[in-house]
Image (spheres, rainbow, N blue to C red):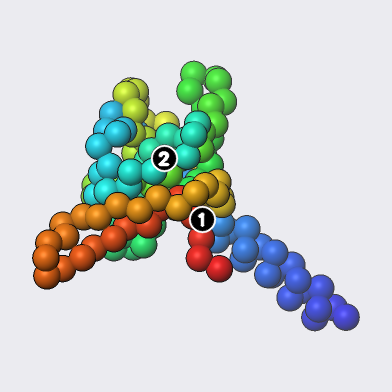
Amino acid sequence: MLSSIIVAIFLSFSLTSVSAHSGDLTFYGGAGNAGYCTQNYVPPGFKTVAMNKPQYKDGLACGSCLKGCYNKNGEKICFEAIVDNLCPECSFGDLDLGESGDGRWDVEWSYIDCPRTELQFSTQGSNQWYGKIKVEGGGPIE
């Protein structure tokens, strides 16, 4: 019984520590340019964010949604965002918000499910010998 409780506590701690991140939040004012991810779809009310290089995972983070909160001069500000870019100079846990702003703020964030919408299709770099189709907005593949 005691070993079951210890395992449950360990798993609970492990999952919490994996899903919550902290780092610095900066601003790059790059919203709307689709970034490294060429992310065209941004859920309504969401901001765009550049992910730090270690957590960008060579593009696997593209299209991921997250919720973050930071304190700016005593005011707690929370946001939801979709990863659309890479921040190569950022360290693990750091985010670079795709809007105008100033300063460097402590941020805590975690991944969330993206809102589902109708699938959106676009072609990129296609020609008569090669076809590349990008699918966005459908949520995670289950």
Mark 2 falls on what kind of element?
loop
User: Which circle marks residue 42 in the picture?
Assistant: 2
| Residues at marks 2 and 1, CA–CA distance in whole angstroms | 12 Å
**Image point (81%, 73%), residue name:** 5
Compared across the picture, whether 38 is left or right of 116 comes to: left
2 or 1: tag closer to the N-terminus? 2
User: Which circle marks residue 87 in the picture?
Assistant: none
**Image point (36%, 35%), residue name:** 97
Quadrant assignment for the C terminus: bottom right
Tell me the kind of residue under disc 1. Answer: Gly
Q: Which residue is mark 1?
A: 139
Report x, y in % for residue 35.
25, 44
- Confirm whether residue 56 shows in the render: no
Mark 1 falls on what kind of element?
loop
Compared across the picture, whether 11 is left or right of 115 comes to: right
Q: Residue furthest right?
A: 1
- Confirm whether residue 65 shows in the render: yes
